[in-house]
Image (cartoon, rainbow, N blue to C red):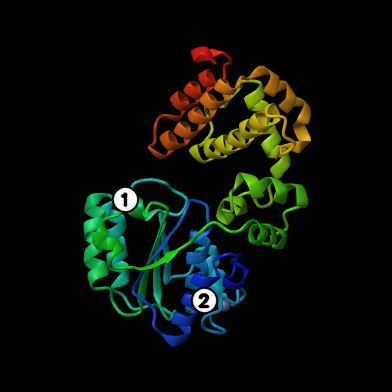
Amino acid sequence: MLTFKDIKGHEDSIARLSTAIGRKTLASAYLFHGPEGIGKFSAAKAFARAVNCETETGHDCGICSSCLRIDGGNHPDVHVINEGYDTEIKIECVRQLQQEICLRPYEARYKIFILNDSHNLNAVAANALLKTLEDTPAKSIIVLVTDKPRVMPATIVSRCRRENFRPLSRAAFMSALAGQGFDAPAREYLSYSCEGRLGMALKLKGSPVISDKNSAIDRVLSGRLDDSMKREDIRKELAVMAVWFRDVYVTKLGLETAINGDRKRELAQCAARYGFADLERIFAAISSSLLYLEQNVNSKLLLANLQVSLQVGRAGG
Ligand SMILES: [Zn+2]
């Protein structure tokens, strides 16, 4: 569990939230926004724990019964909506929230509702939520978490106290990963591939980061992209590909700054095989694939297109 004091690089937000808890000046609605994978959702859960911790207010001790149950997702007063799904949030979800929010907390100080990826509220659901935000019952807090605040209705955003989460500096990112038990090669690799987004890196905790990225590179090199992967896994694969072809590019330029320094031989082979125009086409294909993935384009189609762009010498490359 990532407690308030473990959350690195977002000290301003954490301090503001802690102070509001201590002074009992909490808002009834918050908007946690910032790039995908930055740790907003972890911060929202830590906030819920800090608000309701049984030991000291403003700090989530991480070991009391309340903290443990919030972390485990079985506290009766803390509700997470849309965790792990990047799908439309429908009116039924908001109705459920509305029924629940009218009841007093069972045991906690506050009832807390975390709406993950809240930009996925559909228009009807957003309208219904607006009514609740206009008149949130006492002792309840709604936390909207999103990487796309701009696509959310201004009427909703304006009713929330905003906390902006930014990418971490390299030093803060590396030290946070060390604290979470990542070994040195994994920290080094992730510091480039995650671009300071701690939440993205923490999803890989406990997995063999280096051998997983090498397997993904092997799939790319052999032209065997697996189209049965889940969207989340495709996103990870695309991130590995982006770093790989960035490395091919710098190798081609004669620079010694490859992030995949453990695979210099294959990098040299790729650098000889692909022209600069090929590489530029591949970068464009990877970034449009990431965009298509967000727009829920069929993943088989997406990977088939990407596979074509990995072939050498198209479009005069
Ligand atoms: Zn606690």
Q: Position of residue 224 (x, y in %)?
A: 61, 22
Can residue 278 be seen in the rendering of this structure? yes
Q: Please state which of residues 270 and 2 is positioned toward the viewer in this rendering.
A: 270
Q: Is residue 240 left or right of residue 128?
A: right
Q: Please state which of residues 268 and 33 is positioned toward the viewer in this rendering.
A: 268
Instruction: Check mark 1 vs ligand 1: CB closer than 8 Å? yes or no.
Output: no
Residue occupying the point 61% across, 54% down: 202
Residue at mark 2: 15
Q: Is residue 8 above or below residue 316?
A: below
Mark 2 in CB contact with mark 1 (< 8 angstroms): no
Q: CA distance from mark 2 to mark 1?
A: 28 Å
Q: Position of residue 102 (x, y in %)?
A: 28, 73
Write down the quadrant of residue 54 in the picture.
bottom right
Q: Position of residue 110 (x, y in %)?
A: 40, 77
Quarter of the image for the N terminus: give it.
bottom right
Can residue 95 be seen in the rendering of this structure? no
Three-letter residue code for mark 2: Ala
Q: Is residue 173 left or right of residue 47?
A: right
Q: Is residue 146 above or below residue 86?
A: below
Q: Is residue 135 above or below residue 168?
A: below
Q: Please state which of residues 125 and 250 is positioned toward the viewer in this rendering.
A: 250
Three-letter residue code for mark 1: Val
Element type at mark 2: helix
Quarter of the image for the C terminus: give it.
top right
Residue at mark 1: 151
Q: Is residue 46 above or below residue 25?
A: above
Write down the quadrant of residue 282 in the picture.
top right
Q: Earlier in the sequence, mark 2 or mark 1?
A: 2
Residue occupying the point 56% across, 21% down: 278
Q: Is residue 285 left or right of residue 212?
A: left
Element type at mark 1: helix
